[in-house]
Image: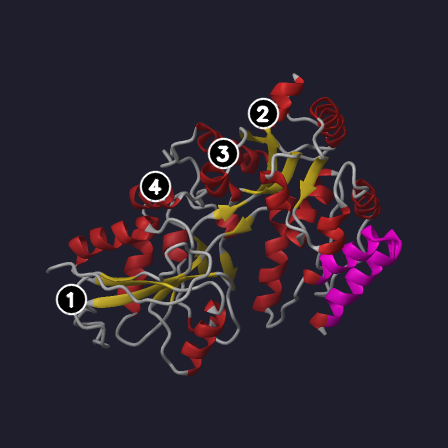
Amino acid sequence: MAISATVRRGRLRWLSVGVIAALTLGACSSGDSDDSAGAKSITFWYSTSAQDQGYIDLAKDFQAKTGISVEIVNLPNDGYQDKLKQAAQANALPDTASVPSLDTIWVNQLQDLSATANNATNNINKDLVTAQDSKVLAIPSDVTAAGLYINKSLFDKAKVTYPTDPANTWTWDEFLAAAAKVRAATKAKYDLVYDRSPARIRPWIYTHGGKGFQLGADGKFATPDAATVQAIDAFSKLNNDVIMPKSVWGAGADPNALFKSGQVVAYFSGVWQVADFADGITNFEWASAPTPAQPVHATDINLGGKVVAFSNKGKADAAKQWVDFIFQRDNYTKLAQANGYLPIEKGLTLTYPFKKQAALDAFALYVKEMELADPISASGQANQTKLLLAGKSVDDALVKDEMGKLVNGQQDTQKTVDNIVAGLNQQIG
């Protein structure tokens, strides 16, 4: 069967070419067929502004092996969840997809992926799959983690050393002392910029020994421990326009742009910055550095896409075959390498396509960071999933809003913590 490709055009503001690629692999009809006769084509939806060659290559291999073509549709992230809702309401869901999160409107139409998730050969990290009542609803395509970047050129100029192995990391106190020394020696503007995000404040809390904002046995967010309150208080005091600019957490300034200006010693963000920095930073050398531990070694482990198979009539068996094919060890290795994924499968040896050594080193460091991370590192996404499976959800953007009030001196730390807990629980109902 010949392999054909079509391109659907649309507006995707973060792609320089302004194009959404929808590659149709195979010329067979996409109409329903009876499972006993065997589906000849299925659809796979996902959204990325980065590399997607991995799925395209796997679809070709899958067709060669099974005779089933896979229509891969890369949709804009903005509106993707709404499109899935509309598709569910119109009884027109894709056969398979990599989704940002599950949705109560279609979660009951998902197939059980337990056989793939529990296959010992795949060695999938089962702590991170989405399961309910022993049924695996989704397997992450990849994982993400938060971490620290430094302006290596400034460190070198100041002749200040930094750790490179997460197993021998520094404390936050040691990092801040080193960053202050670099700033003073190089006349940099700030020691640190820090993403204004609830997912990024979590590792600050965890590494300081706090448990953060966790769901209690009653399904509501509990009052956090004293270590969490202390960590939040300490973080707010760093926003003094010397260590950190108040404009990020206080007013929403862009920390990425500040770091890329070359005037900031370090930046706490996440693995998704690697590809951007590899191509977008040309005026100085950068490096990933181990996340400080004080005393806990932690990060914020979140999930990339969640791969699912819908139970569409006539396509269910083929959909499960495709998902199983994705996570077979050799196939997943190719996918993770081509798309630049931190793997959901343990023990892989991956060779990423980055040309810059800093990017390759960063991925190697992130893999070590996640291996060493305290289990609490995955609790943020676990809480969200638990709520969703109970038919509830929260928008934790209020965390950064309340933190902004604290940074700007509009309320004290205890009031900030109380408002966050009350706001989250009000959304739960």
Dot 2 amino acid type: Ser
How far, Cα to Cα, is label 3 from label 1?
Answer: 44 Å
Image side of residue 248 versus residue 167, left or right: right
Q: Which residue is mark 1?
A: 27
Dot 4 amino acid type: Thr
Check the image and name the residue furthest to the left.
1
Residue 252 pos. (x, y %): 69, 55
Magenta region, main secondary structure: helix
Residue 413 pos. (x, y %): 86, 52
Image side of residue 26 versus residue 143, left or right: left
Magenta stretch contains residue 409: yes
Q: Quadrant of residue 332?
A: top left
Q: Quadrant of residue 33?
A: bottom left
Looking at the rendered image, the disc whose residue lies closer to the viewer, 4 or 2, is 2
| Image quarter (top left, top right, bottom left or bottom right) of the N terminus | bottom left
Q: Which residue is mark 3?
A: 282
How far, Cα to Cα, is label 4 from label 1?
Answer: 28 Å
Give the crowd class for mark 1: few <14, some 14-19, many >=20 residues within 10 Å: some
Looking at the rendered image, the disc whose residue lies closer to the viewer, 4 or 1, is 1
Q: Earlier in the sequence, mark 3 or mark 1?
A: 1
Classify mark 3: helix, strand or loop.
Answer: loop
